[in-house]
């Protein structure tokens, strides 16, 4: 008994000095299995996911189970999974769900694990500002291996040449390009069958909401924003929104905007761009510049694109809050899952290579060979032909190398300079130099209670004004009569009560 008491006393002293915590951290139990849920930002089953899984397990010695719903249905399935109570150990989610699930107790607080992690303390991590933006009331519930990135406007150079215009720098110049792309037969087929642009809806489904139509929204924002003085407002009720909706309505009425925009998905918009239906497409910076170019060329069209800096009235594109990897509170060994899944993702070596470029022999190679008519010498890094999209090469796996929040370790070969195409680097550089970070809106009881119905109402009114079915004044009257004004004011009051 005396020995037990003495041992307990020693433990107490160690704990008071913080030593016991350090010792315990070194004794994290290695999980036998980790179950994750992820969207198609990780290579899919048709794109060599089995090879990824095998390589990951080889590097960690842990069994990995991957649940990967169809990309477009991911968040519906994720919400159903959480509602069922049968939670995976880890799941990825956007900012739309992050703060609410953290507030509901679904997500494990990884603040201490992160502060003590090898990644944070490696000297290679460059994302402190991003992670500060991910904290909720000072606590971290999600890990992002990259910055969020965002959308910039791409314009077909061949279409500009055909109509005799240059890349616009103001809204008036942008409208002139839109008009020419509709009325001057920019694709040269002799028919008036083109639109200037298409978008996946008139308002995005997640923050920052305006990223697919920034040239029309400009300084307007349809959700909650914090002003310079620290107070919260609902951007939908601010005077800037009237100008944005009237610009959208004017462009739609003139035929500049594809009439199926309300129901378009992002794939629909890409296909319209590829088949010469549209000449302007606001989409993700970086790697997507290469994807758009190669797909245009694969369809027999000119692939040269102008990556447009924001026009004067836009000022800066939105850098979205990145999707985050979260450990659920149902996980039986969160410390072990953090150490072997989260903290290895940016290890600066083989694991970071796996998450960034995929698996050698499946996604990339160093062999002497010819891929898509381009010869490579032995030892020259190159991406392989896409298993799902013949005629195109892979560009990355889950981590975009231009957005990574940690460099590779000194002495480790990073093939980024060889694998990333010039157009992708240019688009990324333009976006990074002309973007502003979106912020996470805290979750309150009022937000949980009202924001779903409020967002549905806002989206309906935005679409009706944009398509000419309602004036701005009529929309705001309906906003008040249908309860939107009261919901909005309740949420704003609850957010300002947090200050």
Image: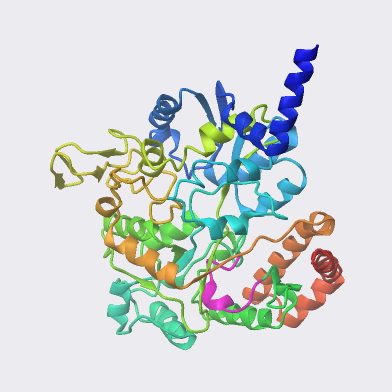
Q: Is residue 378 left or right of residue 355?
A: left
Task: Report the quarter where the C terminus lies.
Answer: bottom right
Name the residue nearer the viewer: 450 or 397: 397
Q: Which residues are magenta?
A: 209-221
Image quarter in which the N terminus is found: top right
Give how far across and how far down residue 20 sits, in percent: 66, 31
> Magenta segment, principal secondary structure?
loop
Residue 168 or residue 330, whichever sits in front? 330
Res 111 quadrant in image: top right
Q: Residue at x 32, y 42 (%)?
A: 386
Q: Is residue 257 magenta?
A: no
Image color mode: rainbow
User: Height in image: 247 above or below 297?
Assistant: below
In the current view of this chain or complex, which residue is farthest to the bottom?
172
Along the line of sight, the residue nearer the viewer: 39 or 411: 411
Quadrant of the image occupied by residue 45: top left
Can residue 153 be seen at all in this image of the molecule? no
Examine the rendering and report whether any part of residue 256 can be seen.
Answer: yes
- Confirm whether the magenta stretch covers residue 214: yes
Total marks in image: 0
- Residue shown at 26%/58% (left/top)? 300
Q: Is residue 178 above or below residue 224?
A: below
Residue 167 vertical placement versus 211 (above, below): below
**Position in image of residue 345 (x %, y %):** 47, 40
Left or right, 405 with reference to 376: right
Seen at 40% across and 66% down, the residue is 277
- Residue 263 drawn at (x, y percent): 58, 59
In this rendered view, identify the residue nearer to me: 215 or 19.
Answer: 19
The reply, left or right, for residue 384 in relation to residue 238 is left
Task: Say which quarter of the image contains residue 456.
Answer: bottom right
């Amino acid at each position: 008994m005396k020995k037990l008491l003495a041992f307990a006393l020693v433990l107490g002293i160690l704990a008071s000095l913080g030593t016991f915590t350090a010792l315990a951290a070194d004794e994290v139990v290695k999980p036998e299995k980790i179950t994750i849920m992820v969207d198609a930002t990780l290579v899919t089953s048709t794109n060599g996911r089995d090879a990824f899984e095998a390589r990951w397990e080889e590097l960690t010695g842990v069994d990995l189970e991957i649940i990967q719903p169809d990309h477009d249905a991911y968040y519906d399935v994720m919400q159903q999974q959480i509602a069922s109570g049968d939670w995976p150990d880890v799941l990825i989610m956007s900012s739309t769900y992050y703060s609410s699930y953290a507030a509901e107790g679904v997500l494990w607080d990884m603040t201490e694990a992160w502060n003590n992690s090898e990644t944070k303390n490696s000297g290679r991590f460059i994302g402190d500002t991003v992670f500060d933006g991910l904290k909720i009331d000072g606590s971290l519930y999600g890990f992002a291996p990259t910055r969020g990135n965002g959308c910039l406007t791409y314009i077909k150079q061949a279409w500009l040449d055909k109509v005799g215009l240059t890349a616009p720098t103001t809204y008036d110049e942008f409208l002139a390009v839109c008009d020419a792309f509709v009325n001057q037969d920019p694709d040269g087929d002799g028919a008036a069958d083109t639109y200037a642009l298409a978008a996946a809806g008139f308002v995005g489904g997640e923050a920052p909401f305006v990223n697919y139509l920034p040239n029309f929204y400009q300084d307007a924002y349809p959700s909650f924003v914090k002003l310079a003085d620290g107070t919260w407002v609902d951007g939908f009720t601010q005077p800037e929104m009237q100008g944005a909706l009237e610009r959208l309505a004017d462009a739609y009425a003139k035929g500049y905007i594809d009439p199926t925009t309300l129901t378009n998905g992002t794939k629909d918009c890409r296909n319209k761009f590829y088949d010469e239906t549209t000449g302007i497409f606001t989409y993700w910076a970086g790697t997507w510049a290469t994807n758009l170019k190669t797909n245009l060329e694969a369809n027999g069209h000119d692939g040269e694109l102008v990556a447009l800096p924001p026009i004067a009235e836009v000022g800066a594109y939105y850098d979205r809050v990145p999707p985050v990897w979260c450990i659920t509170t149902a996980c039986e060994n969160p410390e072990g899952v953090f150490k072997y899944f989260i903290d290895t993702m940016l290890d600066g070596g083989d694991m970071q290579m796996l998450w960034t470029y995929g698996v050698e022999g499946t996604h990339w190679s160093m062999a002497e060979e010819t891929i898509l008519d381009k010869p490579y010498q032995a030892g020259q890094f190159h991406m392989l032909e896409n298993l799902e999209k013949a005629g195109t090469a892979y560009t990355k796996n889950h981590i975009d190398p231009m957005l990574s929040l940690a460099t590779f370790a000194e002495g480790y070969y990073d093939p980024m300079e060889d694998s990333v195409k010039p157009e992708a680097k240019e688009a990324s550089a333009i976006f990074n130099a002309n973007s502003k970070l979106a912020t996470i809106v805290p979750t309150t009881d009022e937000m949980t209670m009202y924001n779903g119905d409020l967002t549905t109402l806002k989206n309906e009114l935005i679409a009706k004004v944009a398509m000419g079915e309602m004036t701005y004044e009529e929309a705001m009257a309906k906003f008040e009569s249908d309860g939107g004004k009261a919901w909005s004011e309740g949420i704003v009051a609850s957010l300002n009560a947090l200050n």
